[in-house]
Image (tube, rainbow, N blue to C red):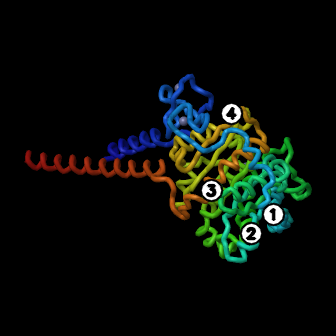
Amino acid sequence: MVKRLGSVILVLVMIFAIFVPVQAAVSPEDCPHEKHDEHTLLCNECGTPIAHDYVDGKCTHCASKTNFIVTEVDPKRTAENEKAGTVVSHDYDTRAYVTEEKLGLTDVFTQKRMNVYLPYGYEEGAAAGKQYNVLYLLPGGMANEDFWLDKTAVKNLLDNMIAEGLIEPIIVAMPTYAYREGQFGGHEVTIDNPGDIDLLLDLFALELREYVIPFVESKYSTYADNANDIANLQATRSHRAMAGFSAGGGCTYISGLQNNLDIFSYFGIFSSSMGRYNHVLPLADILSDSEGYGIDYMYNGNGTKDSSYEYHLPYYFDWVATGAIDDNVNACLVVKPEMDHNIGTSGIADLYNALPMFFVTGKAGARSNGLSTRDIIIIIAVVVVILAIAVFTLKHLSDKKKRKDQV
Ligand SMILES: [Zn+2]
Ligand SMILES: [Zn+2]
Ligand SMILES: [Zn+2]
């Protein structure tokens, strides 16, 4: 019996070894071949993952077509529109979670600022009871809340996309995970102290959940009726998106997807060095532990000359390979030829591509993907154990019968 148990355990260990996803990064470098599978993205000949390469909306490697742009946004969409929305700045109080963590304190408060874009006609809409979707848009490189407004034509883009009917009127909140000088308890982020970046990107999850979202969504007419009630935020998660450029994309993954998936279902990761942030967990694991909350859509964008390109692509390929996302179903990776790490050209093009993908499918509370790898492992393990017990029992019974017959 002990021997049998040993072989059953051995079989289980072998199954785990085969099925547990390998997190090793795959190289995004092009293989010499031309065709890839439309869904797995793997090269038909050598199995190397290759991103879709869109020319005039058609992939050169497969039959897939797209409306995503891989060039700069049409200048007419970044020009002023007479139906202009407004941007309001707000100071808000929040616990300084990073300072608390660094100094071993609790209940340290600080004041931060965010910008909020309100679409054309918001006042009338809100007065008439209209509810608005909200995008939380994060800056790159430890920058402040003015980053997107200073470096891109984000306001004009939103005005034009709404006026053209490409997207519904939307509220865009622009806070920052970063702290102003002096707010970091003497632990400002420096090149020599990069570990603090991980803390900022990670602990913003708490600031977002406890202060930023309740502030924005109780002040403005959103789908949340009671923004201080987590159950209400969970019920309205398909009306909430988070996106960011560079470290803002890392923050979107860590603070949004990884730590607040119950209250967000749309994500945009633009030019992010996923491989450089230390608190990133595998997406398949996040979804396995998400208590049923799934991803309605996850937009990924990068450029071939972007410094974050090689730190972003392997992650996307891994998320597809492990079944965490379905390419061109609830996720995409848009690679823009020759574009570099520039929010004014590449970042704004990604925002233009991502916005129409948000707030569309809306399966709040429902899991977007099917069985996870972990589920499959458990099912196989249970089946193997049942089979082993059945075989053992049958063998035992027939042995017993044989012995009886011999007697
Ligand atoms: Zn190949
Ligand atoms: Zn393709
Ligand atoms: Zn850490």
Q: Can residue 320 be seen in this view?
A: yes
CB under 8 Å between discs 1 and 3: no
Q: Which mark is residue 337?
A: 4
Whichever of labels 1 and 3 marks the residue nearer the N terminus, that label is 1
Q: Identify which residue, 60 or 178, lies in the foreground.
A: 60
Task: Give me the C-alpha separation between circle 1 and circle 4.
Answer: 33 Å
Q: What element carries label 2?
A: helix
Left or right, 224 with reference to 307: left
Quadrant observed for ligand 2 in the rendered image: top right
Q: Is mark 3 on a helix, strand or loop?
A: loop
Q: Where is residue 393 in the image (x, y as percent from the top left)?
A: 24, 51
Task: Give me the C-alpha separation between circle 4 and circle 2.
Answer: 37 Å
Amino acid type, label 3: Phe
Label 2 sits on residue:
122
Q: Where is residue 77 in the image (x, y as percent from the top left)?
A: 74, 49
Left or right, 121 with reference to 233: right
Instruction: From this view, report whether residue 264 is shown above or below residue 284.
Output: below
Image point 51% across, 46% down: which residue? 323
